Image (cartoon, helix red, strand yellow):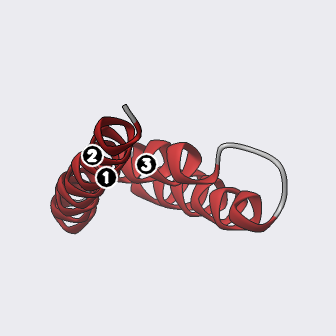
Amino acid sequence: MKLIILLVGVFIIILGIVMLFTPGQGIATIIIGLSILATEFTWAKKLKIIIKKNLKNKTKIIKSYFRERNDKET
């Protein structure tokens, strides 16, 4: 069972990486692949948590940039 989960998870992560350079939801697909791997592997669970935290931080930075930019325009 671990082998099947490993293969499916890695396949979905590879699809996500391809989608980073082509149209599609690359980051979301990578997180889905990590979620599948996290059901059996603790390293994948830790990596998924780290990636989600980094994405949340980057999102806050981007939102604050655009808020400041809008405030300056008005």
Residue receiving disc 1: 65
Q: Which residue is mark 3?
A: 31
What is the CA distance from the residue labelled 3 to the residue labelled 2?
30 Å
Relative depth, front residue between 36 and 68: 68
Amino acid residing under circle 2: Glu
Q: Is 34 on the left-hand or right-hand side of 65?
A: right
Q: Tag 3: Cα neighbours inside 10 Å, few (<14), some, or many (≥20)?
A: many
Q: Are marks 3 and 2 in contact (CB under 8 Å)?
A: no
Foreground disc of the pair 1, 3: 1
Which image quadrant for residue 44? bottom left
Residue 53, by quadrant, is bottom left
Q: Quadrant of residue 46?
A: bottom left
Say the numbered circle drawn on residue 68: 2
Residue type pointed to by label 3: Ile
**Which residue corresponds to the image point at 31% horizontal and 52% vertical from the top-left?**
65
As drawn, which residue projects farthest toward the right? 22
Whichever of labels 3 and 2 marks the residue nearer the N terminus, that label is 3
Q: Which residue occupies 65% across, 67% down?
A: 17
- Image quarter where the C terminus lies is top left
Disc 1 element: helix
| Mark-to-mark CA distance, 1 and 3 | 25 Å
Q: Residue at x 48, y 60 (%)?
A: 6
What's the amino acid at mark 1?
Answer: Tyr
